Amino acid sequence: MRTDVLDQSRGGMWAWLLQRITAVLLIVGFASHLISTHIMAIGELSYDNIAHRLASGFFVAMDVMLLAAVLYHALNGARMVILDYWLSAKAQRRALSLALWLVGVAAFIYGLWALWPWIKG
Amino acid sequence: MINHQLIVVGGGLAGLRAAVEARADGIDVAVLSQVWPGRSHSGAAQGGINAALANDPEGHDDTPEKHAFDTVKGSDYLADQDAAIQMTSDAPGVIFEMEHWGCPFSRYDDGRIAQRPFGGAGYPRTCYGADKTGHYLLHTLVERAYQRGITMYTEQFVTRLIVHDGRCIGVVAYDMTKGGFEAFCGEAVIMATGGAGRTYSNTTNAIISTGGGMAMAYQAGVLLKDMEFIQFHPTGLLTTNILMTEGARGEGGYLINDLGERFMSKYAAKAMELAPRDITSRSIQTEINEGRGIGGKGYVYLDLRHLGAEKIMERLPGIRDLAIHFEGVDPIEEPVPIVPSQHYTMGGIDTDVNGATQLPGFYAAGECACVSVHGANRLGGNSLLETIVFGRRSGAAAARYIQGEPGGGAQAAAAPSAAAVQEMAVAVDRLASGAGSEDSYAIRAEMTTTMKEHFGIFRDAPTMRTGLDTMLALKERSRHMTLRNKFGVFNLDMMRTLELEGMIDVALATATGALARTESRGSHSRTDYPARDDVNWLKHTLAHYQPEGPRLDSKPVTLGTFEPQERKY
Amino acid sequence: MPVATFHIKRFDPDNDDMPRYDEFSVPYEASLTVLDGLFYVQEHFDGSLSFRYCCRAAVCGSCAMYINGRYRLACQTNVRHLDGDVITVEAMPHMPLVKDLVCDMTDFFAKYEYIEPWLMRNSQDPAKEIGQTPEERKKLDMPIDCILCGACYSTCPSVWGEGNYIGPAALLKAYRFEVDSRDEARKQRLAHFDNEHGAYRCHTITNCVEACPKELNPTEGIQWLKRAAVRRRLFGRLK
Amino acid sequence: MSAKNRETANVGAGNWKGLGMWAWILFRVAGVVLVFYLFAHIGVISSARLGGHHTMNTIFKTFDKTLFVLLDLLLVWAVLFHGLNGVRIVLMDLGIGITRHKAMFWACMAVAVVCFAFFAYSALNFIADKGGAWL
């Protein structure tokens, strides 16, 4: 039994807790996101429609919040799936976390860039 | 060859307590166990462990002296009184120690350990954790053994002692998960393998309670003491003989015959269902023999219904589960069919109060030993106490022995232990050679039924005589047993055949001793000699191993504090 | 006399390449437990059959097996209560095998030991018992009944994965000491379960709850541990 | 040969049942699907800045095709299943209903089905209205 691996394993509460917190945010956020996009605007998907919605500061803020939450939730979820089957050593786990953080931050910046005209306005 | 300073054989309460004690004295201890220690039969104990804590309001003036008196009286005065006093005075200390180590005893509202009444005791003196006390105590000690860094060799089937220059220097064991025999050597060996319940077909004991430790010691020339005293627990489940704790009666359960009477009023008017086990078992058997078993059949009822669902669920949840799973009866709604069943071997390896035997370096504790605190009849709740008190004492004594002896046993042990391992291999080869023709399982079945029918609750000379003849014939047949499976891991065929040889020897000691003792005392109840005979028989029986059958001897009982008197309950 | 057909998964790593199933007919009278049946097979048909056994009264945890598609204690399972005439007996799935119905519990007990399963105290023990009210004692009722049979460990998909998850049984044991009013090693214990090979590897799949032959709820204990970690690390509460 | 088989011969045997088990497997599958969708979604939204309004509207036109509406429905089911099973898990994390997780699962699924019916009704209406091409 490789108890050395167990001995190296530290932390994880924040990941677990944030996964729950983002989950709750996403439940609320997605309810409004889905209603505002799929129900109110079903069949009406177009640039203008979206631009119109995003003209409201509330929706921009909402989308930025959702983007951050969903990225964390998704990438941490992916991390959990991966860790369940591979990468038990401490260095491997660290590298995976780092890689996922890089992906997440990059995706978040890219998302901000895509939303920039409305954030700015 | 594997070396440690102290080899403890058996991972139950006695073995672990001995190991923990010796480890505290700085000894390098190894525990060898046939199962993972937490699976030992100690864990099946239910009702509780006795100690004069005086926690119960009704028992506020309880003392170790009163406990010792009850123990000696319960033993029908065959217990060594110095040992009984030693045990009962050590009792409160070891209970508190177990509690400090985490044992989850049930509690009174003020936070103290709860105590319940038990058979043969003058006060509520039995500390308990619901009806799983053994399980809780055993796990607590396993935990402590891990904490102390004791080396555990689990799933080791120990087959014989290694004796060299008149000293015990180790054991030979079959490694069940790896296969093959290996010698474990040390400067001392503590035997704590439990009882020999499986020599009877109607036993409450675990399947591994085959008396292996007694047999190994006996075959190595150590004496067995008082083997004829076999306790029959009043309440085993009808079909499986699984134990229904005495705590069920301690909590107020009734014993009921076919007429619906609480028949114990006829036999022990004052103590009723809480008479000692020998008396209660005989009473039940008498009712059955006289046709008052339920429906005229061979069982009576243990009735708990009047206790109510809440009390049963809180105090006796485990036996409720057992009754439901194994008998299909829910004690909340129906009475439980029970029958007296072999439960405990009062006798065992002859030791002093420190677990020492006549063989230097060889100690024994627990049910496989006979200190003698139980004499002719053990009180409920005293067996768990015995394991812990005398486990502790033998661990300390072995540590003193090791520290007092010049070390360097390892080199001296190399040659004899290699020879012992070689002898085991030869013995297995001989069994597997195909020269024999006897099926060990047929012999086993015949032996266990012979013991049940000829050396049961009521005994008499003609029955025992034919029983002993059968046993001797079986012993002869066992020399020609054959083994179908010689090799490999987890070879049950080999283990069960080897253990049978020991079981027959132990059972023969029981049978011979029972036939010789021409009196009735405690659990040994002879219809042809119904009275106790203090003039001729207030003495221990000793059995010397001889290849053709035991040679009996005797030694005096230590008296001095309590005068023998008639037992009344 | 009724006959039960035992369909037993056999595997001897020293001689076999792959497991196989052997079939045996076991006659019985009124009642027959699966463990009785295994003994009958071992004594009458095939002495090489291997299985674990000890108390035969459902308290030792030796004979946990996979019987007719469920985790059961062989000693506690009466063939009359099983559906159908064929009784399929297998070792606990997903475990390394020693032989036949005996699986290798080495890792299981290593992980049990890893969580330091003993009462830890800093203060001087009193001369008598350490007080504990019935209410405090009641919290222990569930976890102390664990017999460490390994069924929960065998059934847990988190254990199947990467193999370093300490598993439901060890975590339940950690919980047992966490909720013991007498234990004083809250900080030390946190390190055992407050990590991703500990409590957070539990995905509340609840297979362990289904599998437990003693009807305990390891998930409940593990969830409690996660909350305890949050309480302790965010709010500094020790209880 | 045997040492290896000792480790592997029994792996994967039996025990692929239990509600909690399948709830978890599907939860996980839906989660992984949603991770991929998330990145696709970010890509689509950013098309407005990458290629301008026209690019985005072209992509949206494709999504009006029946196949994509049905795929969209699958996505909605993934979100609903993952989300509502997630509600159950968060409740269990809070210590609520651990002993009644099956009942909670079915309650959450009932909510999911009701929501899904609503979305399915809208989607089917949309397909009927547009009478759009399959692809």
Image (tube, rainbow, N blue to C red):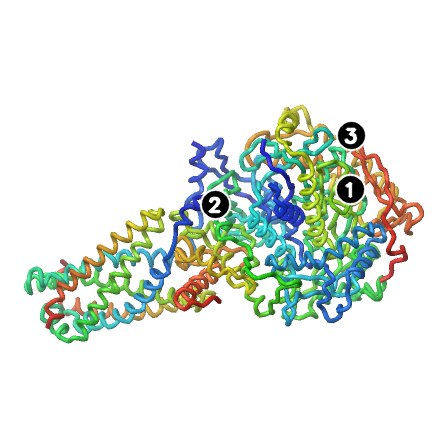
Q: Is residue B568 above or below residue B466?
A: below
Q: Nearer the viewer, mark 1 or mark 3?
A: 1
Q: Is residue C79 visible?
A: no
Secondary structure of the residue carrying tag 2 is helix
Crowd around label 2: few <14 · some 14–19 · many ≥20 (10 Å): some
Crowd around label 1: few <14 · some 14–19 · many ≥20 (10 Å): many
Between C238 and D117, the one nearer to me in the picture: C238
Asked if residue D126 lies left or right of residue B153, the reply is left
Asked if residue C104 lies left or right of residue B547, the reply is left
Q: Amino acid at mark 1?
A: Asp
**Label 3 chain ID:** B
User: Which residue in the structure is indicated by mark 1?
Assistant: B350
Q: Amino acid at mark 3?
A: Pro
Q: Is residue D28 above or below residue B453?
A: below
Between C127 and B488, the one nearer to me in the picture: C127
User: For residue B105, which numbered disc appears in the image?
Assistant: none
User: Which residue in the structure is indicated by mark 2?
Assistant: C107
Q: Nearer the viewer, mark 1 or mark 2?
A: 1
Q: Is residue B502 above or below residue B16?
A: above
Q: Are marks 3 and 2 on the same chain?
A: no
Secondary structure of the residue carrying tag 1 is strand
**Label 1 chain ID:** B
Q: Position of residue B10 (x, y in %)?
A: 64, 43
Q: Amino acid at mark 2?
A: Asp
Q: Which quadrant holds residue B278?
A: bottom right
Q: Are marks 1 and 2 in contact (CB under 8 Å)?
A: no
Q: How far apart in space, not on screen, are marks 1 and 2 (Cα)? A: 40 Å
User: For residue B547, which numbered disc appears in the image?
Assistant: 3
Q: Position of residue C58 (x, y in %)?
A: 60, 53
